[in-house]
Every structure is written in C-alpha cells, then in structure tokens.
Amino acid sequence: MNDPILLTPGPLTTSTATKEAMLSDWGSWDTAFNQLTASVCSDLVDIAHGSDSHVCVPLQGSGTFAVEAAIGTLVPRSGKVLVPHNGAYCERVVRILGYLGREAVVLPFGDDQPADPALIGQALADDPAISHVVQVHCETGTGILNPLSRIAGIVASHGRHLIVDAMSSYAAIPIDLRSMPIDALIAASGKCLEGVPGMGFVITRRKVLESASGRAHSLAMDLHDQWIYMQKTGQWRFTPPTHVVAALRVAIDQFKAEGGQVARLTRYAENCATLVSGMRRLGFKTFLDDEVQAPIIVTFHSPADPAYSFADFYQRVRQKGFILYPGKLTQVDTFRVGCIGAIGADTLRLAVTAVESSLREMGVTRFAPD
C-alpha cells in the first residue's frame, strides 16, 4: 500500500531519493559526517544569499526548538521584543518569550490581515525600549504572507534588531539577506526544502552571534556554544540527527537541480492555484484573499451543511490517499490543505476529487460556509 500524500505544511511528502538517503548509518564524529554537516550549512546560508555576513547554526529538534534557541541566545535577558501578531505561530513566539522571561509587546492584527509595516514603525517610535522584533514571515495557521522586505526596512530604519521565523517560507519565498537587514532567519529541514523533520537551523549575522556568548537560558539550546564548538571541531556538541542531515543533503541537491528557490516557488504557486480553483469550483471559500495568500498552505471555510464533520471528512479523504490538516482558528470553522512537498499540480487535482467524493459520501451537498 502506498503512503498517503501529506497535504500538510510539514512533515510533508518527500521524494524516493530523500527517503533512500536515510538507509545508511553515519558516525556522529566521523569526518565524512562532519563534511556532510558543513556542506549543508554552507548551502543553507547560500540559499538566503547570506554567505558574506551570516552563518548557519543547526540544532536538533523541530522548528520551534530553533525559534526558542534563537530568541534565547540572541535577545538579551533585558531585551524587549515586539511581536506583530496575526496567527497561531505568532502566539507561540509570545509564549516562548514568556517562558524565557523576555518582555513582549504584542501588536495585534486580524488573522486575515498581514502585518502593517507602518504600524510596526509607529510601535517602535512610541517605545524606544523595544530592542527586537520577531516576525513570522508566513503564518502557517492561515497561510498568510507578511511583507518581510518592507518590515525589515522599517525595523532597520529604527535601529532595532529583526529575527524572522521563516519556517514555512524559507527556500520557496524570496529572502535575500544582502538587501534585507535581518539578524536571524529561522527554518527547518522538513518544510520547503522537502527534507524530513528533525533539524532546525538559524542563519544568523556572524557579528550578532559572536556577541551572544553566555546569554542563552539553556545549554542544549545555546546557539553560540553550538557554533563555537562546530568551528573548533567540525562536530555537533551532542548526538546529531544523522539520518535527517543525510536526507537534507540529498533534498538540497534536488532543490538545486530543480532550479532553486525560483523553480520551487513556481511549482508551489501552480499547486496552490490548482487547489484553490478546484475547491472554488466546488463552492468552497478561502479564508484569505488571494493577495495575501502564500502558496504554502490554504485555509478553507468548512461547509455549513449539517452532515459535515471534520473527523469523518478527514478519515474519508485519508482512505483516498490524502492527509489534510485541521483548522488552526478558534473563532471560525476551517480546515487546511498544504501545497508543498514533492508533489505537483496533478496531485492537487486528485486531492480536490477526493474532497468532493468524500463529502458526497457523507451526504454533504452544500460546500459553502454560512
């Protein structure tokens, strides 16, 4: 039986070559593995065009581990952090700041509204004590894309530091560290690079990282200590996710062969357009307007038909070979469908067909929300 297609924002469906890369075992201190890690880190910086100014620090764990490590290492304990808030992963940043004892200032926006650079600038002007801004680039809870380039310019113009959660945008949406003043860019192996989950990483300005010695709240999540140790030895401080790194090496090779970020964005955009047009033909309504929708994951309003339940719908679609995501919104009944992974537009057409037939089996005839 074939594995179901993961229409989620990570983990996601990977290629056969990426899966096969995990069939070999690696010694964590072996020279060959150290070279593998170094090549992956070098390429990760290059993808964001940061080789002249930034370095990559990998970390065991999910993307959230890397977000917490970046904040805990790069933001002083006396720092004050502005969080433009328009979704669940922005809320997670606020929670992390609370755990770390860093003061947070929340700048709220609607779940369907992108962060406004002008309002961010006003908040910085109103409060000179704010030292950092932590911005989620693509809010995966809805799929909204925040205007990163303009936000980076505003933050820099006020002389503050910018940390970017690029978990669901890195390697697909353009991010150029040569022109965007960003102190740290955070992503993970199991997203748009189409690797497997298990390794987060922070691409951080070298000078900023060099000044962060002794600041971290945690030994395991001390990015400065991890980086220094790697510079000296070529090794991870603690047991690395060897199979994840090996799979990521192969995934990056495929990323390059496909044509890099531009080609990946083109494919994801086609996937998204195919999905949205097909679902709209059935009568579904997207939560976001097209102008702010990233081609990563799409949130749809659930059908208002009383015969609909997400649990039943999910199982029926899964039986047809596709795994969807529940909604992340608390006030609106939604579900989400991902557009990323080692899939193309034909897969999304089949998914739309699976959605339609599953709902017909349930007796759902009205696909639109109230």
Image (cartoon, rainbow, N blue to C red):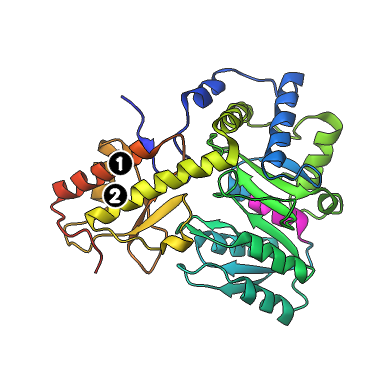
Q: Position of residue 146 (x, y in %)?
A: 56, 62
Task: Read off the residue under disc 2.
Answer: 278
Q: Amino acid at mark 1?
A: Arg
Q: Is residue 74 magenta-colored?
A: yes
The answer to whether residue 101 is visible is no
Circles 2 and 1: CB atoms closer than 8 Å: yes
* Residue 52, image quadrant: top right
* Mark 1 closeness class: few <14, some 14–19, many ≥20 residues within 10 Å: some
Q: Is residue 283 left or right of residue 96?
A: left
Q: Position of residue 269 (x, y in %)?
A: 45, 47
Residue 26 visible here: yes
Magenta-colored stretch includes residue 208: no
Which range of residues does the magenta coloring cover?
A: 66-75
C-alpha span from label 2 to label 1: 7 Å
339 or 333: nearer the viewer: 339
Answer with left or right where residue 166 lies relative to residue 5: right
Residue at the limit of the structure toward the top, as seen here:
24
In the rendered image, which residue does mark 1 sit on?
A: 349
Image coordinates for residue 258, horizontal then vertical, percent: 54, 32
- Which type of secondary structure does the marked residue at label 2 adopt? helix
Relative to residue 158, is residue 328 depicted above or below? above
Residue 82 horizontal/vertical position (percent): 67, 70
Query: Which amino acid type is shown beneath numbered disc 2?
Result: Gly
Quadrant of residue 252 in the image? top right
Above or below 94: residue 5: above
Kindly identify the residue that appears in the image at 70 percent across and 69 percent down. Answer: 154
Secondary structure beneath dot 1 equals helix
